[in-house]
Image: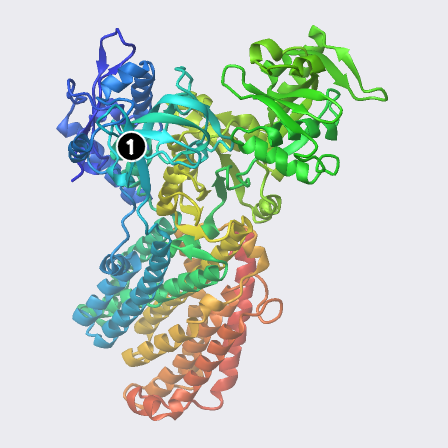
């Protein structure tokens, strides 16, 4: 068991008293039971505590009031809600994040010496012996990842699928009460085939997923004292890092834990996987107090990385003590294990069939018992009716559909981790997507270079290029974007080291927020400055106006305000803006010792222009958004980046930005669930969201009746991926995101999502075809048997004949997963609806009974097949066998499309072939030894065939009429 990690008392300041202490424990269902339902039932927070460093003087735990009786009521309510709806009541508040913020803000308020003292370390790190003790105390620096299921767990889950349980129950009834061992073996075979197919596909997907996981244990370098006042850098596994370890930071380094900086220079850190911000953020040792903990200047988080600069940091939290662990713990807790819409829909249909059987069987027993005066036989007959109501092939057809869908998705380089996700994608009506790396390329691009008049001007790029190319400091992503843009600009690309000589450089710092280079050419020497707009304009005294004279004009206060307003307008469009300026260096300033300084020389600049940067949308993003609209799938963007950037990207790709909101604004509705859900429904762009807020948005959409897909690849997306009906990620995503996803794309193409939606709808259509066809047909058969038992003095068909008829009928349906689906059907999402199945069964089921009664009448009155214990019975049974088999086999062609079958729409060749083969086999049976010997059939009279054809044609015509009325009445078919 992972040992608990004790945290420091949270203080509001150095001098204030204790606000609270708390102890981290893994988030489990058992730990949640200890929380008081009265105090927490409104918010039902996920409590995951992350604090600062260990403090040996304070080890008290955070006490919560408890009430065992209320806790039991609360647990029962949660259980009942989960069983009935397949959902969890998930948190809407961020109690754990508030605790993190308090602990981290308290840590950053300390000076460097106090930080080192708090963690019992120094600039040279801790010794190996201390590290070993702390590793034993705090545990390994690793997070709980998703545990892959064992083969027997996958098989067991397949067996306890609602339809399999229902079939096994009915099979037991068949062999115990109805004395039908053949039915039991047939049902058992269907369950085995169904479970085997499903287990095979899931094991195959799991194997593919497992191969994607990291096989090499990552290493990191920590400082160890050398005993003579210095240090050595020692490489150790990341799992062995402990609080108090000190690390040097270089470009490319990944933070092995949550850290506090004790030294830094020009340090830029990428937090995109955690926050969604596409640009690196500046990190310094300067204390600040921002609204978001991710903006704490001296705190860096586990799994983020250094882009440029250098620094030194103290590890303050590892493993289950990091911010990342809050996401990991919640991800693996029972609170986030929600059922998707497919699972909920299947359960409802199973309950419907079981409930219908419970209602129907007593009626059958009563009528049959009153007619025959033998209630024992009536009960046996009732059990047969209950078995007959159930579509035995449903699990097999269902899993064959899912397996075929998974196979098709594999061709699109998509790993289907859960087979149910195929069908769920077809029901999805809202896609929630992260922005960075999902809608965008996750790379910074220079979008424009504007002069003071706001016109694109290559001269601005030329100056920026000189500043970036000839600086000797580390290049950041903005410099890289400038250099890349210059390569494609003919007016800039010719410059090289031969044309310019670097005289001096004034490097970037976080106070000036700009950097300057002094460059000398054959004609002149200039100082070129690039940096933040406000700071750069403050040192400009003139502006270059590009006209026929290219004159430099005095920068008045009004002119400066206009330029600031233009920059603000560009920022409002989601663009990152830098300014460029230059000044001429007189030759006399280059004589003697050259000593340029910011205080002396960064003044009297000429403003040249603006540079704008953006993380551009993916090339196929706009087309994918149009596809979503075509297939009536809404799109909502949930990002941790700022609102302006998110809106700009969304506007570019065609996402409506009329209603937008930020995370802090969304928190205002946290205590009003109705307002929260209404806001989530209305808004399309959500910015500055925390991981739990993303999770809550997804949950609110599900409560609003939507089936939600979530597309993301970062740590901050993991909870939302788990909470969605279908989570979608990519193979380059973070480990947490991939663990939480149901589908993993091996290619970063949004249009694969469209293919998944279409494939899901095809799978759903073919599954619902079988369900509606089988339930309505079986209901009609039971209804017909009920009429026959009250009318005929003999059995209308023997048990063996019914079994063979069902077997042939089921064989004809095996090709359904390969059937075609109407294009019109694919344009809209279709939810699982038990009410729709019941309504369809009641409307279409009795139609076959009408023609069964017609057949009974023809055989009874016209052919006079009414005498028991004679060949009349065999003729009667064979004729009805023909009618029942052909009508049941053809029904799929009537149901599979809203159009007129065989005229406006044709089935796939696989389904057509299976239909023809089964009809031929059925018609040939009375002429075989199996038919005459085992089944007791006789070839029907030739004069019966005209009546037989009338029944088939009449059934098809009336079914088409009822179909048209049904569609007109209920605006749906499948």
Judging from the image, the colouring scheme is rainbow
Q: Which residue is mark 1?
A: 232
Q: Residue furthest front?
A: 592
Q: Is residue 696 left or right of residue 646?
A: left
Q: Is residue 145 left or right of residue 842?
A: left
**Mark 1 nearby-residue class (10 Å; few <14, some 14–19, many ≥20):** some
Which x, y percent locates residue 840? 44, 57
Q: Is residue 887 above or below residue 680?
A: below
Front in this rendered view, residue 620 or 41: 620
Q: Is residue 449 above or below residue 596?
A: below
| Residue 794 appears in the rendering | no
Residue 155 quadrant? bottom left
Front in this rendered view, residue 506 or 508: 506
Residue 230 quadrant? top left
Which x, y percent locates residue 958? 53, 67
Front in this rendered view, residue 588 or 396: 588
Residue 537 quadrant? top right
Q: Residue furthest right?
A: 548
Front in this rendered view, residue 200 or 670: 200
Which x, y percent locates residue 851? 45, 72
| Residue 618 appears in the rendering | yes
- Which residue lies at the image location 48% right of the left edge and 25% below the top edge? 662
Q: Is residue 940 above or below residue 84?
A: below
- Which residue lies at the image location 14% right of the left edge and 29% below the top edge? 69
Q: Is residue 273 above or below residue 886?
A: above
Image label count: 1
Where is the N terminus found, in terms of image quarters?
top left
Which x, y percent locates residue 474? 51, 31
- Which residue lies at the image location 83% right of the left edge and 21% below the top edge? 547
Which structural element holds mark 1?
strand
């Amino acid at each position: 068991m992972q040992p608990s990690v004790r945290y420091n008392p949270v203080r509001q300041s150095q001098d204030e008293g204790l606000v609270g202490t708390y102890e981290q424990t893994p988030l489990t269902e058992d730990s949640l039971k200890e929380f008081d339902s009265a105090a927490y039932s409104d918010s039902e927070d996920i409590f995951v505590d992350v604090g600062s460093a260990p403090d040996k003087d304070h080890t008290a735990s955070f006490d919560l009031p408890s009430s065992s009786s209320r806790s039991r009521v609360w647990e029962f309510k949660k259980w009942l809600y989960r069983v009935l709806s397949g959902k969890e009541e998930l948190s809407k508040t961020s109690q754990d994040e508030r605790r993190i913020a308090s602990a981290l803000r308290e840590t950053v308020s300390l000076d460097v010496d106090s930080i080192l003292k708090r963690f019992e370390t120094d600039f040279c790190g801790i010794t190996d012996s201390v590290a070993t003790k702390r590793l034993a105390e705090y545990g390994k620096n690793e997070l709980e990842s998703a545990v892959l299921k064992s083969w027997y767990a996958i098989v067991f889950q397949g067996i306890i699928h609602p339809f399999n349980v229902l079939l096994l129950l009915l099979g037991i009834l068949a062999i115990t009460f109805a004395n039908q061992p053949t039915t039991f073996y047939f049902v058992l075979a269907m369950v085995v085939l169904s479970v085997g197919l499903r287990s095979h596909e899931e094991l195959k997907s799991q194997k593919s997923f497992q191969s994607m996981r990291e096989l090499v244990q990552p290493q990191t370098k920590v400082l160890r004292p050398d005993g003579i006042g210095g240090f050595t850098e020692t490489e150790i596994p990341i799992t062995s890092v402990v609080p108090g370890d000190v690390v040097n930071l270089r470009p490319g380094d990944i933070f092995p834990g949550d850290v506090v900086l004790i030294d830094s220079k020009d340090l830029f850190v990428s937090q995109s996987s955690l926050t969604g911000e596409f640009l690196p953020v500046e990190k310094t040792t300067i204390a600040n107090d921002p609204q978001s903990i991710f903006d704490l200047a001296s705190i860096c988080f586990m799994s983020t990385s250094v882009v440029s600069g250098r620094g030194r940091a103290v590890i303050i939290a590892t493993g289950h003590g990091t911010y990342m662990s809050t996401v990991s713990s919640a991800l693996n807790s029972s609170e986030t294990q929600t059922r998707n819409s497919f699972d909920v829909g299947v359960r409802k249909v199973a309950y419907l069939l079981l409930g219908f059987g419970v209602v129907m069987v007593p009626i059958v027993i009563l009528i049959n018992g009153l007619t025959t005066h033998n209630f024992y036989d009536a009960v046996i007959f009732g059990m047969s009716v209950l078995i007959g109501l159930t579509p035995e092939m449903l699990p097999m057809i269902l899993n064959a559909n899912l397996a075929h869908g998974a196979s098709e998705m594999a061709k699109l380089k998509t790993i289907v981790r859960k087979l149910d996700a195929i069908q769920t994608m077809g029901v999805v009506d809202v896609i929630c997507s992260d922005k960075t790396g999902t809608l965008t390329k996750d790379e910074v691009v220079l979008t424009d270079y504007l002069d003071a008049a706001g016109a694109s001007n290559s001269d601005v790029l030329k100056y920026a290029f000189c500043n970036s190319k000839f600086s000797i400091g580390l290049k950041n992503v903005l410099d890289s974007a400038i250099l890349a843009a210059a390569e494609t600009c003919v007016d800039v690309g010719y410059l090289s080291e031969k044309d310019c000589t670097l005289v001096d450089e004034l490097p970037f710092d976080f106070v000036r927020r700009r950097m300057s280079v002094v460059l000398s050419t054959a004609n002149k020497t200039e100082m070129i400055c690039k940096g933040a707009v406000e700071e750069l304009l403050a040192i400009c005294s003139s502006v270059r106006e590009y006209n026929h004279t290219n004159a430099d004009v005095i920068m008045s206060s009004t002119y400066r305000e206009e330029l600031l307003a233009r920059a603000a307008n560009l920022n409002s469009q989601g663009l990152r803006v830098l300014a460029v300026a230059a000044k001429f260096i007189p030759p006399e300033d280059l004589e003697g010792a050259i000593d340029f300084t910011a205080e002396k020389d960064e003044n009297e600049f000429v403003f040249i222009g603006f540079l704008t940067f953006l993380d551009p949308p993916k090339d196929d993003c706009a087309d994918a958004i149009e596809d979503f609209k075509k297939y009536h799938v809404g799109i909502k963007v949930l990002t941790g980046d700022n609102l302006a950037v998110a809106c700009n990207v969304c506007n570019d790709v065609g996402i409506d930005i009329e209603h937008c909101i930020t995370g802090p604004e969304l928190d205002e509705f946290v205590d009003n669930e109705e307002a929260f859900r209404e806001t989530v429904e209305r808004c399309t762009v959500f910015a500055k969201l925390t991981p739990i807020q993303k999770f809550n948005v997804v949950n609110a959409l599900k409560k609003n009746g939507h089936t939600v897909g979530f597309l993301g690849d970062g740590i901050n997306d993991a909870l939302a991926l788990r909470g969605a009906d279908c989570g979608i990620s990519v193979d380059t995503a973070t480990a947490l995101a991939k663990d939480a996803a149901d589908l993993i794309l091996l290619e970063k193409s949004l249009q694969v999502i469209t293919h998944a939606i279409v494939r899901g709808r095809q799978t759903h259509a073919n599954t619902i075809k079988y369900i509606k066809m089988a339930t309505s047909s079986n209901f009609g058969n039971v209804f017909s048997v009920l009429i026959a038992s009250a009318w005929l003095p003999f059995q209308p068909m023997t048990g063996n004949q019914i079994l063979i008829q069902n077997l042939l009928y089921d064989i004809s349906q095996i090709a359904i997963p390969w059937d075609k689906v109407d294009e019109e059907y694919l344009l809209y999402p279709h939810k699982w609806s038990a009410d729709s199945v019941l309504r369809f069964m009641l409307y279409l089921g009795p139609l076959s009974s009408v023609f069964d009664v017609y057949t009974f009448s023809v055989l009874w009155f016209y052919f006079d097949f009414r005498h028991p214990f004679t060949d009349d019975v065999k003729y009667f049974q064979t004729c009805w066998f023909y009618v029942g088999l052909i009508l049941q086999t053809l029904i799929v062609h009537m149901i599979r499309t809203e159009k007129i079958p065989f005229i406006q729409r044709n089935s796939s060749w696989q389904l057509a072939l299976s239909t023809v083969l089964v009809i031929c086999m059925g018609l040939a049976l009375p002429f075989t030894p199996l038919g005459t010997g085992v089944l007791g059939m006789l070839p029907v009279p030739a004069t019966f065939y005209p009546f037989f054809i009338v029944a088939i044609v009449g059934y098809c015509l009336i079914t088409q009429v009822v179909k048209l009325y049904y569609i007109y009445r209920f605006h749906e078919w499948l």
